[in-house]
Image (tube, rainbow, N blue to C red):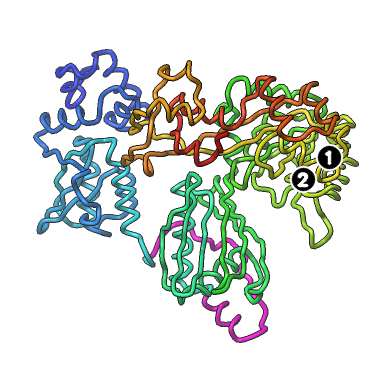
Amino acid sequence: MNLSGLAKKLLNDGAIADDAIRNASDTASKQKIPLVTYLVQNNLVPARTIALAAAEEFGTPLIELDAMSVDAFPKELVAEKLVRKHRALPLFKRGTRLYVAVSDPTNLQALDEIKFNTGLSTEAVIVDEDKLDGAIDRYLENSETGFNDLGDADLDDLDIEAGGEEDRASDVTAEAADDAPIVRFVNKILLDAIKLGASDIHFEPYEKAYRIRLRADGILREVARPPVNLAPKLAARLKVMSQLDISERRVPQDGRIKLKLSKTRAIDFRVNTLPTLFGEKIVLRILDPDSAKLGIDMLGYEEEQKALYMKALEQPQGMILVTGPTGSGKTVSLYTGLNILNTTERNISTAEDPAEINLEGVNQVNVNTKVGLDFGSALRAFLRQDPDIVMVGEIRDLETAEIAVKAAQTGHLVLSTLHTNSAPETLTRLRNMGVPAFNIATSVSLIIAQRLARRLCKNCKKPLDIPHETLISEGFKEEEIGTFTIYGPQGCDKCVNGYKGRVGIYEVVKVTDGISRIIMEEGNAIQIADAARKEGFNDLRTSGLKKVKDGLTSLEEVNRVTTGH
C-alpha cells in the first residue's frame, strides 16, 4: 500500500514508524474512522504534531481553539446532525464564506455537505483533534440553552395524568404542565444531567428565586435560575411525568420517570417531592442500570479487600452488610456482588425502596408501605420461595433485622445496607436495635463501610509539596514519607476543577473469631475497631490515605469524606 497525503507527511517527518502508520491506516479504514482520530485516540502521534503536519502539507491555516470563545461562533447556521456526523465546527462567517474547523483537511465531504446545507462557500481551518470534540459539545450546548426547541428525545411515551379537580389552582397547573416551553426546558435539564454524569437533580423554590442544581461527582453546582413565577409550572410538569397527584402539595410524594434515550438505552429517575415554605422542592435521583455492570475491579477495592468480599460471596450462608451515607455507592457495591452471583442455578430475590438498578435474573420487589408490603413482609415471602440469596435494601427496624439474621443462620446468603459511619459501629447498631449479641456474632460474616471521593484528572493533576509535620498530622507514617508523591487538582478542559469521576474508599472487616468474642461479650464499637486494626483490616482513613499515595485522589478530598483520628 502506497502512502499519500498526511500519512506520508507524518512518516517523512519521523513522527511515526513505517509499519505503525501502515497498520493505523488499515485499521482506521476497516473501522471506518478518520486516520487522524485513530492516531490520537491510540496515542500514536500527538494531536498538535498532526495539526502542524496537515497545515504544512495542505497549506491550510491552523488555529488554536482554546483561544476562541464558543459564544462567538455562528449559531444555528449548520444543522446539528452535520456538525456531529463530520465533527466539523463552524467558526466564523465573512460575507458568503464560512470558515469551518476540522482536524482532518482531507474530509472534503464535510465541507461539501455544509456548503450545500448553508448555501455558503466553505473554507477549512485545522484544529487539534483532541480539542475538537469538547468544543463541539460546548457549541451545541450553547446553541440550545433556555427555551429553544431541543429536538432531543422527548418524554412523549409517558402516560400523562392530570390531578383531581379540587380547586382552580390545580386546573391551572395541569394546563401549565403541558406548556411547550416548560416541557422542553425540563427535558433539556434532564438530558444535560445525563450528559454530565450527574447523580441527582435538585429543583429548589425560594421566596425571591428559583434554582436548579446538579450533583456531579458528589458535589452540587448550580446550572440554571429560571424565573421564580415558573416554580408551580415546573413542579407540575415533573409531577405529571412521574404520575404523581398534582393537586396534592401538602405531603411528600414518591414517583419514577423513565426516559428513553434510544431503542436500547433507557434511564430511570427516582422522584421525590417535599413541601417547603415557598413551594415544592423536587429531587430526581438518576438511576443508571449500567452501573451494576462496572465489575468489581472498577469500584476501587484494594486487592486484599476485594479478596475478602469475593470469599464472603462464595459462602453458602451468612450476612454481608454495606454501610455508609446516602449516595456513597452502597447499592452499586451490592449489585456488583449480585451480578457475580447471578447464575441460572441460584434463586436471587431483592426487596428495595425502590429498586434502583434493574438486573435480569434477579427477582426484584419494590417495597410499598401503603399496602403493607414492608421489608419484613417481603423478606418473609422470600423465605417461602426457596431462595439462595436474599438482598434487603435497608435494615431499618428490629423486625427486618431479626428475619435477616434468621435467614443468614438457616443457610441463606443475605446482603443488606445499614446507615452507620464505620464497620465496627454497624455491629453495635444492630445490638441497639435489639438483635441479641449471639445472633450478630453467628450471622454477620463481612461488613463494608464505604465513601466516594472524587478522582483526580489524569491529564492535569500536579505534584504538591506538603510539609513533613503536616503529613504526620494527617496520619501518614514516618517511615513511608518520601516514598510517594502527593498530587492535587489543577483543572483543564477535560475535567471539573481538577477532578473527573470517583473512586471508592473502603473499610472491609471480616468478622473473625476475635471480633465475634468481643460481640458476645457485648463490647463497644471502639473495642471492635481496635480488634479490627490488630487483625490487619484498614479503616476508612487508612484506605483513603492509600488512595492519596497511589495518586488517585487528593488529600483534601480524603479529608472531606473521612475523619482523622
Q: CA distance from mark 2 to mark 1?
A: 8 Å
Q: Does residue 441 belong to the magenta stretch?
A: no
* Residue 413, position as x, y percentages in the image: 80, 32
* Residue 340, position as x, y percentages in the image: 68, 29
Residue visible at 59% across and 32% down in the picture: 540
* Residue 104, position as x, y percentages in the image: 22, 35
Placement of 178 over or under 390, stated as above or below: below
Residue visible at 20% across and 56% down in the picture: 72
Residue where numbered disc 2 is placed: 395
Residue 469 versus residue 376: which sits nearer the camera?
469
Q: Amino acid at mark 2?
A: Ile
Q: What segment carries the magenta color? A: 149-176
Magenta stretch, main secondary structure class = loop
Residue 32, by quadrant, is: top left
Residue 39, by quadrant, is: top left
**Mark sitting earlier along the chain (2/1):** 2
* Residue 35, position as x, y percentages in the image: 28, 29
Question: Label 1 crowding class (10 Å Cα cut-off): few <14, some 14-19, many 20+?
Answer: many
User: Are the residues flagged by discs 2 and 1 in contact, CB closer than 8 Å?
Assistant: yes
Residue found at the far bottom of this picture = 168
Q: Does residue 157 belong to the magenta stretch?
A: yes
Looking at the rendered structure, the secondary structure element under dot 1 is helix
Question: Label 2 crowding class (10 Å Cα cut-off): few <14, some 14-19, many 20+?
Answer: many
Residue where numbered disc 1 is placed: 404
Give residue 171's mark: none
> Which part of the image, by quadrant, shows the C terminus?
top right
